Amino acid sequence: MTIHPDGQYAYVPDIFGDTLSVIDIEAFEIVNQVSVEPTAGADAVRPWMDTAARDGETMLVENNGGETGTESVWDISDPANPEEVTRLTTEDNLGELPLTSEIGPDSAVGYVFTADTNDVTVIDLASAEVTDRIDLGGSAFVGTWGPDGEKLYIPVQTSDEVKVLDHAAGEIVETISVGSQPYGATAGRVRPQTDTAASMLGTLATLGIDIAAKGTGTTYCIGNCACGHTL
């Protein structure tokens, strides 16, 4: 789910219904439901993740249908009536298995995490075309923007690293070694206070040592996740 920048509407892709639902947040009800039709030779589109641009004009939707998945660019300039502009495939140089996406702070460029080809697919939102594929050297499912919106931090699960993508340069500018199999990331705008104990716990976690208190544990998505994540 993603929320339009005006704060009035949320967009919910339905992976099993091949629809995109528009929800009025205050009324908490569906005000529109757009059918997403399969292309020739496909039995379903399976939209399941989405990201709205900050300018409120464009939205990216990841589709899990077919062998390699597809990526849709939507026009949300009329927030209650979104329209699919185009659907990109591997024939358009889209990477395989698009899982999630992030959109640059200028709302001009989209970054799609295409896990099966170990890269990030870069999309020009104005032209709705793939302009680049950035190699990550491993499989990544998500990314998060730093507080200033200039760099995208991408945990690469299969290489135990976080890649730092500079938006202005359009390339990876740093690689950070982290703990085993990093899966998700969220950047905060406030740096937490640290002390000796917290620093030690962070070091132990980086080394892969179980530090969870008794009765606690990591939570995971439940059921048959479309991203293929397994415990």
Image (cartoon, grey):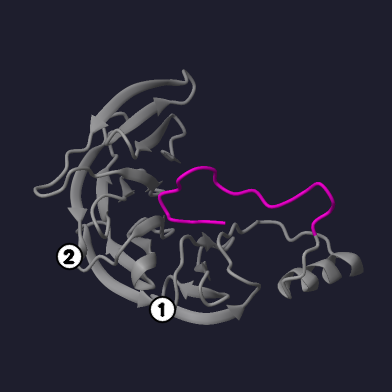
| Circle 1 Cα neighbour tier, 10 Å, few/some/many (<14 / 14–19 / ≥20) | some
Span of residues in magenta: 212-231
Lower position in the chain sequence, tag 1 or tag 2: 2
Residue 6: give x, y in percent of width and height.
43, 35
- Residue tagged 2: 92
Q: Is residue 102 left or right of residue 36?
A: right
Amino acid tagged 2: Asp
User: Could you tell me how far apart the alpha carbons at marks 1 and 2 are, in whole angstroms?
Assistant: 21 Å
Residue appearing at x 29%, y 39% in the figure: 76
User: Is residue 33 a member of the stretch shown in magenta?
Assistant: no
Please determine whether, in this image, residue 141 is positioned above or below residue 196: above
Residue 122 is at least partly visible in this image: yes
Label 2 residue SS:
helix
Which quarter of the rendering shows the C terminus?
A: bottom right
Residue 202: give x, y in percent of width and height.
78, 68
Query: Camera-side residue: 7 or 31?
Result: 31
